[in-house]
Amino acid sequence: MPRLSTREIMLQAARTGMVVPAFNVPHLPMMEPIVEALRAARAFGLIQVARLEWMKFKSGSLKAIRDTYAGCKDERFTRLHLDHVPVIDEDNLTVDVEAIIAEAMALGYESVMVDGSRLPLAGNIEATLKVVKMAHLAGLPVEAELGAVLGHESGPLPPYEELFLSGRGFTDPAEAKRFVAETGVDWLSVAVGNIHGAISGAAKSAKKVEARINVKRLDLIRAAVGQVPLVLHGGSGIRKESILAGVQHGIAKINVGTTLRQAYEAGVAVSAAEARQRTLAAATAVIRDELEIAGSADRLGTAGGIL
Ligand code: 13P
């Protein structure tokens, strides 16, 4: 059985209406129990790290994550992805995106994300195109974001209902069409009611607001971008019916960070063993109960099953 690339796996997921979870690793010891949860459920998922997780949390560096991954990966069920590398970060600072992406590619990351969503459309297109050119030369797929998935910035969010009903920051279908055509991006992260869990202040440890998805908007985006797999960030704490509806309407990758981080951090206050156990339980609940993807590695063909 040939080893499937992340690009092929994601296209297969999008074609067959399946979702691939991408689990963030803000603390290195979270990784092994996440891999174990995927293996035990025979589900396929990505292990991912965002820049802010080595800057503001304890994942160390791109290399530390890669080395930890090398020690616990199971390629029947996992691949390694670089999550958010923002052009303008959550503190409004400009980031040398290309240097970070180049380092990740050299270290063996298997797909990358550039996040130009804080730029106007033309700037986002320009920044994304640069990364697409770099990554495609190495045969790696690129994820980019269009629209504002809020939540990482410091300070309070506007009330969720107001945000949802106004559609403020939602991905515009016509812009999505242009963005995909002009960048050649492989996967598109969209804003359709989803928000990121907070990463600073007291909100970081508080229960995340329950978000939902505007499926009509998702359908319009889907129709505008054709077969490009769509990505839902802010996957923690979205209503289950909303997540499953999102998957039926084109979401092929869902990013999950806060739920597992909070489980790990609560456990660490007790012991390392407790932290491992709670991370395993939280990942298992997402895989089996929320996303209902036990056995997905067999259906996607990564575990040696039949495509
Ligand atoms: P949550 O922390 O809200 O699950 O979002 C994770 C995410 O989207 C990382 O890119």
Image (tube, rainbow, N blue to C red):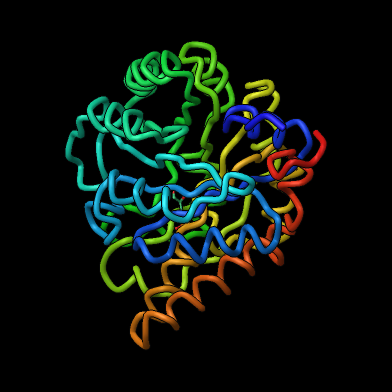
Q: Residue at x 26, y 25 (%)?
A: 98
Q: Classify residue 94 as left or right of residue 233.
A: left
Residue 77 rendering spot, x and y as whole percentages: 62, 49
Decide which of 233, 143 is in the foreground and name it. Answer: 143
Q: Residue at x 70, y 56 (%)?
A: 42
Q: Classify residue 40 as left or right of residue 154.
A: right
Quadrant housing residue 306: top right
Q: Is residue 168 above or below residue 103?
A: below
Number of numbered tags placed on the structure image? 0
Quadrant housing residue 104: top left
Q: Residue at x 59, y 60 (%)?
A: 238
Residue 210 rendering spot, x and y as whole percentages: 56, 65
Quadrant housing residue 204: bottom left
Q: Classify residue 61 as left or right of residue 10.
A: left
Residue 132 rendering spot, x and y as whole percentages: 42, 18
Q: Is residue 193 visible?
A: no
Decide which of 24, 148 is in the foreground and name it. Answer: 24
Decide which of 210, 97 is in the foreground and name it. Answer: 97
Q: Is residue 43 visible?
A: yes
Q: Residue at x 22, y 52 (%)?
A: 55
Of the 4 image quadrants, the one containing the N terminus is top right
Q: Is residue 268 above or below residue 112?
A: below
Q: Is residue 73 above or below residue 181?
A: below
Q: Residue furthest left?
A: 93
Q: Is residue 113 above or below residue 34?
A: above
Residue 118 rendering spot, x and y as whole percentages: 32, 35
Of the 4 image quadrants, the one containing the C terminus is top right
